[in-house]
Amino acid sequence: MATEVLAPLPGKIIRINIEPNATVVEDLEIMVIEAMKMETPIYAPCDGVIEKMLKKEGDEVEEDDLLALIG
Amino acid sequence: MISHLTSLVKTTGFVYLTPGIIVMWIIGLTLIYLAIKKEYEPLLLLPIGFGILLANLPLSGLMTPGEGLLWKFYEYGIHWEIIPPIIFLGIGAFTDFGPLLANPRLIFLGAGAQAGVYLTFFTAHAMGFDIMEAATIGIIGGADGPTTIFLASKLAPQLLGACAVAAYSYMAMVPIIQPPIMRLMTTEAERKIRMTKGRKVSKQEKLLFPIVSTFLIILLVPASAPLISMLMLGNLFRESGVVERLKHAAQNELMNIVTIFLGVPIGATMNAEAFLQPKVVFIFVLGLCAFMISTATGILLAKLMNLFSSKKINPLLGAAGVSAVPMAARVVHKVGTEADKKNYLLMYAMGPNVAGVIGTVIAAGIFLTLLTS
């Protein structure tokens, strides 16, 4: 069962630090969302492999949008 | 020959220089330095700093009533109450009240953070400021520039320059002033509280919000009408979705234009005789106290609400009840992430933050109603 990474706040993805299929450990910064002119890092919720990256840099996201799947 | 030369020298400003004028130059240059080098609210402190220099050039006549260029900016822009409401139009156009509607109970935090305004009002009055001046100093605690200017121009124009500079300086220093108070007043465990998701806010709700609030607030506190009406009109532009051009103009071009005409005359009210008084030091000290008390009471109110509610509020959110938007919300988020880096408080903090703007306008409206009737 893959773990979903959801957007914790609305904003714009300004940086993605990892590729699909990359191995991540919990609390690794996987991307950065900019909201209210402030950069907010998004951390991996668990250890695993990025199965799917659903957004790309420059995308606007709403709260709770699915960002990535970690398996 | 010599007499011609002396009369020529007398037409220059040099002979009229006083130590006070030189001190004002230093203050003006310091603000310009802070704006450029430290980027402290540069949009305002830069024109204010330059305005101070202009007002302290002898014989320039820029502030001569009825004639001077800057006097006209001041008279028709600020004294006629045009510019602060236009700034509020722009603020309304770019403010999303969604976070407030998603967590309506956080409105109370925006109100709780106004306590500093009233406490400072009584303190300033007790210290010998007259009642009008005391109200103007207290409103600095709301940390809202246009509201401070609006109230000062009506109640105590002689303090306008000092109060405006104090308000904008403290807003710029939100990230320095607030965090120590926030850490002192909350425990690590409290800072780690994660907020439960707010409900989803529908488009209709956001559209109705400016209309309903206009009725409600203006009927309740009529004196707040100039600021609230423009704030809500700007927000209606935004949420209606059909006047993109007006929304854009209000929050960009129009806002930028009036900002120029706001900063320079505010600086120009600060001539040496009016500004270099012991009183001004008290304004800065009391203004800072007001701001610190507001931060603290916001936090205390959040803790109080937690006693009665099973859905815990992260008390840091209370600090966002001062209306420095969005700096205060960002500070809440930062202090929160220091305790738990996966705690995203930013959007929750925007709720009390925008409520704080409305709260400060209402506080100003109450002062106006009680003190000028």
Image (tube, rainbow, N blue to C red):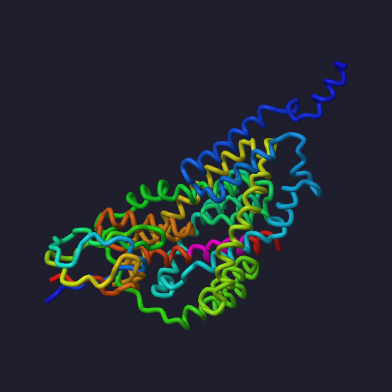
Residue B122 in sight in this render: no
Closer to the camera in the image, B227 or B190:
B227
Q: Main secondary structure of the magenta part?
A: helix
Residue at point 47% right, 58% down? B322
Q: What is the magenta range?
A: B356-367
In the rendered image, residue B225, in percent from the top left (x then y), is placed at 64, 69
Q: Image quarter for residue B14? A: top right
Residue at point 78% right, 44% down? B64
Give the number of marks: 0
Which residue of the protein is positioned furthest toward the bottom in this rendering?
B204
In the rendered image, residue A56, in percent from the top left (x then y), is placed at 29, 68
> Is B120 rendered above or below residue B231?
above
Closer to the camera in the image, B139 or B51:
B51
Residue A55 in sight in this render: yes
Q: Is residue B144 left or right of residue B86?
A: left
Which residue of the protein is positioned furthest toward the top in this rendering?
B2
Closer to the camera in the image, B5 or B160:
B5
Residue at point 22% right, 59% down? A29
Q: Image quarter for residue B363? A: bottom right
Residue B363 is inside the magenta segment: yes
Residue at point 59% right, 58% down? B256
Quadrant (top left/top right/bottom left/bottom right) for the C terminus of chain B: bottom right
Residue B94 is inside the magenta segment: no
Quadrant (top left/top right/bottom left/bottom right) for the N terminus of chain B: top right
In the rendered image, residue B174, in percent from the top left (x then y), is placed at 44, 50
In the rendered image, residue B81, in percent from the top left (x then y), is placed at 68, 60
